[in-house]
Image (spheres, helix red, strand yellow):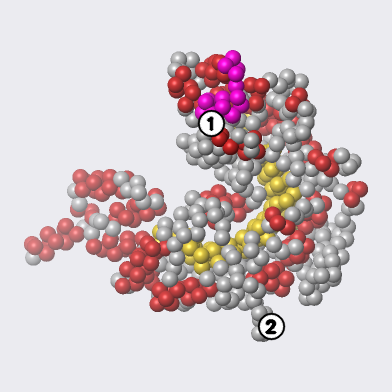
């Protein structure tokens, strides 16, 4: 009896010594190699057998592994001990680091493991290309709600009808073999529960094209089409006939050379447009719509995007119930978020049209978007013969008319005309005389990115410089700009004044990012003054993100983020804090300037691998 009491006493957590409990809690804090949400559960799994059984049931619900090889090994092992049935979520691949397509899932193994995941709710594979035959692995996963895959339509179009509860579908289409020949009329599964459709299509997927033309998604709320190869009118028509859509994110394949008229985009947002084919060569199943209510070329708003995204809210309950192909005269929605990538429009000015630049956009659009809370504008149209100070002051005056704006993100692709006289370069202050050193430490572009076209006649520099977008050392900049000894000494003096007066020459010459550090310190007080003007004039503004370098190859390599702190009672500006990040900095790379809004923007910033790849097939 005493032995039994002793066993019972030892089995009770309440009777454990304080030192042992403290050891358990300390062990929880030491699990730095595990995600935070799993550390406590992992620690409990080592307390006793009963808690281990409960803890493993929880831990086995999420199977997150970086490679296909590890996934195969883990799932095979879990199936042998009967724990595979507990899996709820599978993710294969790193979510933070975009990667080329590597690894594979053997089709025979997928067939053998068919039916092993009966309780699965989400499946994401970012490391391997999936073909329709691989999806037999998910046979019997009747509760699947989220599917995120890189798909190759090599054999036949994938049929999603087996997963009737699908709510989120993210597909990146890869190279496909020829066109499909259908022996029977195309039928579409029920997408009654699908609320998010995200497709990256740079290969001309027939699945996407057919679904844009004929499929219907009665509950669709979020649409994300990237690198679309379908004609713009077809995409616009799809948006128009899905009135439940409240978030739309679209970019077209670069080979299509799609320049999108701003006034038509406004009609797409507010629901008053009518969209149809613009020529007689479209497929016969498309209705012969006409585009009505679009301004003539003489009245066009010259603010032309190549990519756009918007979020919107209905203005009245019936707005999301409209099912007519023609757009009504009464506006149905108003925008709450807007993201645009504007093309370089300078050449139009030679033909008479008035081009809308950033400060003019902020001046004219409050009446078009009265409830806008987030605005993201990536401008390739440069400013010529003007100054940062004057433009920021003009923007600040215009922001007083924006009554709901909370987040403003902007960039300029170029700050000078390549063919203009150097005296017309965009400068910090009005009438600021440009100097040779201004291109290095006194230019508005930070010393972090040198256009590659500068090296066409000097290929020897390519081997001496870091990758595009990473900060330069002093000696690298000295080589690129060909500084004379006197100019180099002036630049050294500036760096020492901003960073460390006692710095030795060797450290100054060879430390990566030191010129960039001096650039930030040199201009931070002035930029603070300009950003404060924006915050004072717009009492709802919470953050301002400035990308001082436009898109370089596939990224914006630097961001200067300003956060606005206000008094609780008066909403007056108490202070602004800032963070400057760049590719390769200790704080981590800045997020790319995504032309996305709402849910899709959050997904892109949390899981970059889902929106950008280093290599494509």
Instruction: Indicate whether residue 480 is drawn in magenta.
Output: yes
Say few, some or many: other residues with alpha carbon within 10 Å of mark 2 (under 14 / 14 to 19 / 20 or more): few
* Residue 182 in view in this figure: yes
Q: Position of residue 349 (x, y in %)?
A: 85, 40
Which segment did they paint magenta? 473-487
Q: Is residue 24 magenta?
A: no
Question: Which of marks 2 and 1 precedes in the sequence?
Answer: 2
Which of the image's four quarters has the N terminus?
A: bottom left
Determine whether the residue tagged by mark 1 lies in a helix, strand or loop: loop
Which residue is at a point 66% across and 85% down the rendered structure image?
183
Badge 1 local density, few (<14 within 10 Å), some, or many (20+)? many
> Which mark, by number, is residue 443?
none
Q: Tell me where residue 457 sits by quadrant.
A: top right
Q: CA distance from mark 1 to mark 2?
A: 60 Å
| Front residue of this view, candidates 48 and 363 | 363
Residue at the farthest bottom position: 184
Residue denoted by label 1: 472
Q: Residue at x 76, y 24 (%)?
A: 423
- Residue 549 drawn at (x, y percent): 64, 36
Percent position of residue 153, x then y = 58, 71
Q: Which residue is the site of mark 2?
A: 185
- Tell me residue 516's x, y (percent): 55, 28
Does dot 2 land on a helix, a strand or a loop? loop
């Amino acid at each position: 009896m005493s032995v039994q009491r002793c066993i019972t006493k030892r089995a009770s957590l309440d009777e454990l010594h304080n030192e042992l409990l403290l050891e358990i809690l300390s062990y929880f804090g030491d699990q730095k190699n595990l995600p935070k949400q799993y550390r406590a559960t992992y620690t409990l799994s080592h307390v006793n057998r009963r808690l281990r059984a409960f803890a493993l049931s929880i831990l086995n619900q999420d199977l997150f592994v970086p490679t296909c090889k590890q996934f195969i090994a883990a799932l095979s092992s879990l199936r042998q001990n009967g724990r595979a049935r507990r899996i709820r979520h599978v993710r294969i691949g790193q979510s933070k680091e975009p990667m080329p397509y590597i690894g594979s899932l053997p089709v025979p193994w997928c067939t053998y493991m068919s039916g092993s995941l009966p309780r699965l709710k989400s499946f994401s594979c970012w490391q391997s290309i999936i073909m329709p035959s691989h999806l037999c692995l998910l046979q019997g996963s009747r509760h699947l709600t989220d599917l995120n895959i890189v798909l190759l339509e090599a054999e036949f179009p994938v049929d999603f009808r087996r997963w009737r509860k699908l709510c989120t579908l993210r597909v990146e289409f890869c190279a496909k073999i020829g066109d499909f020949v259908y022996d029977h009329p195309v039928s579409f599964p029920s997408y009654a529960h699908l609320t998010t459709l995200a497709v990256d299509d740079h290969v001309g997927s027939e699945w996407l094209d057919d679904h844009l033309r004929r499929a219907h998604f009665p509950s669709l709320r979020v649409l994300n089409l990237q690198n679309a190869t379908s004609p713009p009118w077809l995409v616009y028509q799809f948006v128009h006939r899905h009135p439940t859509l409240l978030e739309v994110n679209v970019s077209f394949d670069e080979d299509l050379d799609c320049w999108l008229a701003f006034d038509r985009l406004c009609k797409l947002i507010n629901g008053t447009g009518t969209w149809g084919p613009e020529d007689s060569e479209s497929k016969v199943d498309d209705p012969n719509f006409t585009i009505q209510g679009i301004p003539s070329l003489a009245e066009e708003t010259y603010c032309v995007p190549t990519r756009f995204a918007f979020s919107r809210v209905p203005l009245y309950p019936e707005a999301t119930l409209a099912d007519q192909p023609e757009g009504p005269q009464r506006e149905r929605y108003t925008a709450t978020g807007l993201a645009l990538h504007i093309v370089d429009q300078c050449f139009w000015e030679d033909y008479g049209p008035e081009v809308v630049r950033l400060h003019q956009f902020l001046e004219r659009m409050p009446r078009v978007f009265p409830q806008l809370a987030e605005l993201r504008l990536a401008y390739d149209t440069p400013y010529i013969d003007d100054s940062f100070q004057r433009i920021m002051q003009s923007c600040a005056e215009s922001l007083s008319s924006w009554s709901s704006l909370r987040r403003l993100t902007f960039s300029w692709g170029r700050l000078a005309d390549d063919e203009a006289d150097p005296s017309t370069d965009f400068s910090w202050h009005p009438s600021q005389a440009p100097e040779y050193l201004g291109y290095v430490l006194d230019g508005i572009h930070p010393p972090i990115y040198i256009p590659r076209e500068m090296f066409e006649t000097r290929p020897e520099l390519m081997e001496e410089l870091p990758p595009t977008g990473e900060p330069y050392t002093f000696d690298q900049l000295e080589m690129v700009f060909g500084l004379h000894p006197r100019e180099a000494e002036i630049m050294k003096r500036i760096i020492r004044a901003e960073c460390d007066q006692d710095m030795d020459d060797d450290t100054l010459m060879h430390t990566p990012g030191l010129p960039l550090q001096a650039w930030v310190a040199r201009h931070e007080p002035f930029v603070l003054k300009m950003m404060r003007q924006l915050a004072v004039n717009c009492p709802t503004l919470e953050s301002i993100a400035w990308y001082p370098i436009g898109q370089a190859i596939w990224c914006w390599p630097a961001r200067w983020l300003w956060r606005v702190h206000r008094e609780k009672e008066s909403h007056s500006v108490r202070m602004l804090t800032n963070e400057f990040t760049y590719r390769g900095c200790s704080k981590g790379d800045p997020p790319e300037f995504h032309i996305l809004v709402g849910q899709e923007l959050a997904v892109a910033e949390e899981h970059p691998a889902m929106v950008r790849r280093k290599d494509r097939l």
